[in-house]
Structure formats: C-alpha cells, structure tokens
Image (spheres, grey):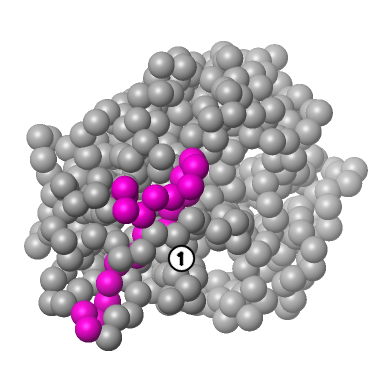
C-alpha cells in the first residue's frame, strides 16, 4: 500500500488526476477537481479566520456539501467536530463549552448558539494558504455514545484514521475502480471510517443521502450497513447488481442473513469497533461462528478478568476537554473497553457489555447472548433483550424484535428453551415500534428499555 506524504486528495490528484473520486447529488469530481474544490473551500474558511489548531463544529446530516466542508476544514488544520443535528440544545449547552470551539458551520436548521457562524464558501477571495500535511496533527473530535453520562470527544489524528483504514483495506479489497457508498453518518465514527478508507485507497465514494438505499447503491461495489438494511434489501429484492462487498456492524448478525447475501453474490464481513479506535479493530468474513474475527494489523487484544483491553494504531490521542487531551488508556497504553469477551480459536468473541449485565432472581443475564440466539431465528431481523422490573425476581428479560410476520411468543419460547436456561427466557415479546427506528443507525438500548418498561 502506497505511503501518503501529502493530503490524500492532493496525493491522488497528482497520481490519478482524471480518475473518478466522488459523486453525489448530481455532481461528479475527479481527484484533480476534488483537490481544487477543497482548496477553494479552505481558502474561503481561512478568510473567515479558520486557522491551524482551532476547533470547528460542523453540524448536519450527510450531504455532499457536509463532506466537502469536513475535508476542507481538516485541510485548514482545524479540529473538526461533526455534530448530529438531532442532539438537543440542552445537551449541547452542557457539552460544547468544554470543547474549545472557535466556529460553527451549520448545515441544519438553527440549533446551536454561542459560536461564531461560518458562512458558506462563495467565490474564494484568493488562493488557499498552504497548511503542511502533518499526519500527527489532531484532525477530528468524535462524540462517544454517552451511554454512561455526558458524551466524550475522542480526538484522532490523521495518522490514526489512515491506520484504521489500512487495517480494514488489508482484509477487504477496495481497488481503484470500486465505489463505496457513504451510507452511515459523518457524526458517527463508522461514517468517518468509510471516508478514510476511500481516501487511503484512492478509489471512489458515492454520497446520495436523499435517495432510498437501493437507489443510492446503484453503481456501488461496497457498502457499510447494519444487518436490518441488508435484510430489507434482500427481502424487497432490491440488491443492486454491482454490490459485492458489505461490511456489517451495529447489531447481532444472523448467519442466515449473510448466507442469503452470499448466495446473491455479496461477500459479507463482520467486525468489532468503537469510537475511541477510529472504527474497526477486529473483522472477518462472516460465518456461522460467534466471533468477530482476529485483530487487524497492528491491533492488540488482551482479556483481563473477562474485560476486553485494546491497543491499536487507530487509537485516539485522548479525550479533548478544556483545551487539552485527557488520557483514555492506562499507563501501558491499554484502553479498557468495558466489553466482556474471550479469545476462542484465535478470534475475539464479544459476550456483551459489562454495563448491560443484570440479575434476575440472583442469576446473571447477559442480554447480548440471548440476542445472538434470537438473531438466528429465521423470522428475526433485529433483536433487543432488556430488563424490566419484577416484584419477585427483581428483573426479568423481555425481547423487542424486528421480524417478518407476526410474532408467535409460544413458538419463540419453545425455540429458545432448547438453548437457554429457564431464567434467561424472555417473559414477553414485543414488535419493534417504528418510533424506535428513527434517528440513527444504531438504536440506543436505553430507549428500548424505557419503551419496554412503559408496556408493563
């Protein structure tokens, strides 16, 4: 794999100037045209005061303009924080003051106050001031899920993003003539992972957020999807002819789903990753085994008292707060993931979150283990198991399912009973409501639990 000693778009503009680089929303860019457009945008933002080392919030849903601004601001040397436009103002009021941001470039309806706004780039007043490409410079801040409190901002360098991308590309070929769909949001590390794989490989990227998934995938060879997206494409008979490689994540992956996809000519990979590691850490071709694969090149896994510890070249430099980095790893560089896991047959197996473990009548229940079994049922596309309060046992498990056809609780219980002890069997099964499917690529477990509690 070639070394990058320049901004990736400028590197490919010199080597593949006329090669297709980016398409979307009716626009097409070669690498040379993309580099010129990013120079134009960078010059416009520099003229408004953006300089190396300053923080810029970039707010909005995926669009071609959002992606171009993301890259142009990084070329300015800024630390770019992409914000989900659905984050509530009260949360932003708590979060943003500690992130030392200088500007806001807003692509959504007004929702953030207190930051000087950047105006859309018009005709650039002059040439772009060259900011030397320094892979070690902090380029992005990415918010964690905030499942255990206020979200943290993981700070990644360009080198970390490129190292993470190289690890995935060593497993999943992404040749120059291929095209990956930006199907996941840039405010999530999985969306940024797609972008940096594209930049590392010098292939093509498609950005079509306004189109239904099946139409957006037209002409794309690669995609990153959650299992339900792939399941719906197959169910509706809408698999694009060109699509032949899919990286799955975000939920338990039913073996029947990947087997069906392989029959349709789609090679499927599954993996394990997180915000702090710039996306993927382990991956493999999907199979019937429960593991998530071996560590990617340069990544290390250590299991201590069932907790997964990680060191990786894509590791964040720290959490950014009050103008400085705060360590996320221990003294030996290990990041403590709070995931329960084990190594089996040379690959990592994730048992669940330590934080998700609950007790029912004194017996420990790891909901992810039940979810993985439910995902193997031919009717089930997505499964959540959450605890609800119970006067006798303290808590009991209930299942919330996205499934084809009506749920048959007795049949599901009978199917699970051969594989689980009685105390782990869900006491109720609910169809996943549409209200929980809105708002992101990954449904927060806390929202499912709140909804399930309201059904009691």
Is 102 situated above or below 290? below
Residue 360 visible somewhere in the drawing: yes
Q: Quadrant of residue 237?
A: top right
Q: Quadrant of residue 316?
A: bottom left
Q: Position of residue 373 (x, y in %)?
A: 26, 46
Does the magenta-highlighted stretch encompass residue 378? no
| Quarter of the picture holding the C terminus | bottom left
Please name whichever residue, 425 or 184, is drawn nearer the observer in this view of the structure: 425
Disc 1 marks which residue?
A: 448
As helix, strand or loop, the secondary structure at mark 1 comes to helix
Does the magenta-highlighted stretch encompass residue 393? yes
Q: Position of residue 181 (x, y in %)?
A: 59, 31
Please name whichever residue, 379 or 354, is drawn nearer the observer in this view of the structure: 379
Boundaries of the magenta span: 392-412
| Quarter of the picture holding the N terminus | top left
Residue 9 visible somewhere in the drawing: no
Please name whichever residue, 419 or 252, is drawn nearer the observer in this view of the structure: 419
Q: Quadrant of residue 87?
A: bottom right
Q: Residue at x 76, y 55 (%)?
A: 107
Tell me the crowding category of disc 1: few under 14, some 14 to 19, or many 20 or more residues within 10 angstroms, Cα based. Answer: many
Q: Position of residue 408 (x, y in %)?
A: 39, 50
């Amino acid at each position: 794999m070639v070394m990058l000693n320049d901004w990736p778009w400028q590197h490919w503009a010199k080597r593949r100037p006329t090669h297709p680089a980016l398409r979307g929303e009716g626009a097409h860019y070669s690498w040379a045209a993309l580099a010129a457009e990013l120079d134009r945008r960078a010059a416009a933002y520099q003229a408004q005061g953006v300089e190396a080392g300053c923080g810029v919030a970039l707010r909005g849903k995926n669009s071609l303009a959002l992606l171009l601004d993301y890259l142009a601001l990084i070329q300015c040397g800024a630390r770019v924080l992409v914000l989900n436009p659905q984050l509530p103002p009260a949360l932003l009021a708590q979060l943003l003051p500690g992130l030392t941001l200088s500007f806001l470039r807003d692509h959504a309806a007004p929702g953030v106050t207190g930051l000087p706004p950047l105006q859309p780039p018009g005709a650039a007043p002059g040439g772009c001031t060259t900011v030397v490409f320094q892979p070690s410079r902090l380029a992005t801040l990415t918010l964690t899920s905030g499942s255990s409190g206020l979200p943290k901002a993981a700070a990644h360098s360009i080198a970390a993003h490129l190292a993470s991308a190289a690890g995935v590309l060593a497993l999943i070929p992404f040749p120059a003539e291929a095209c990956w769909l930006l199907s996941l949001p840039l405010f999530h590390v999985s969306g940024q992972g797609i972008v940096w794989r594209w930049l590392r490989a010098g292939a093509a990227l498609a950005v079509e957020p306004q189109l239904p998934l099946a139409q957006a995938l037209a002409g794309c060879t690669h995609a990153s999807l959650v299992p339900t997206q792939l399941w719906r494409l197959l169910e509706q008979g809408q698999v694009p002819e060109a699509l032949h490689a899919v990286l799955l994540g975000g939920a338990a992956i039913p073996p029947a789903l990947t087997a069906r996809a392989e029959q349709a000519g789609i090679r499927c990979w599954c993996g394990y990753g997180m915000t702090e590691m710039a996306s993927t850490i382990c991956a493999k071709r999907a199979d019937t085994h429960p593991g998530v694969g071996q560590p990617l090149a340069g990544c290390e896994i250590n299991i201590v008292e069932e907790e997964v510890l990680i060191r990786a070249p894509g590791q964040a430099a720290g959490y950014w707060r009050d103008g400085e980095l705060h360590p996320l790893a221990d003294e030996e560089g290990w990041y403590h993931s709070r995931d329960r896991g084990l190594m089996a047959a040379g690959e990592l197996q994730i048992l669940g979150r330590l934080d998700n473990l609950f007790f029912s009548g004194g017996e420990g229940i790891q909901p992810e283990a039940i979810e993985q079994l439910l995902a193997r049922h031919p009717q089930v596309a997505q499964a959540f198991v959450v605890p609800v309060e119970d006067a006798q046992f303290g808590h009991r498990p209930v299942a919330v399912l996205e499934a084809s056809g009506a749920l048959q609780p007795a049949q599901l219980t009978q199917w699970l009973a051969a594989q689980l002890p009685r105390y782990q069997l869900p006491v109720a099964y609910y169809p996943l409501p549409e209200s929980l499917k809105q708002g992101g690529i990954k449904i927060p477990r806390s929202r499912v639990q709140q909804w399930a509690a309201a059904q009691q």
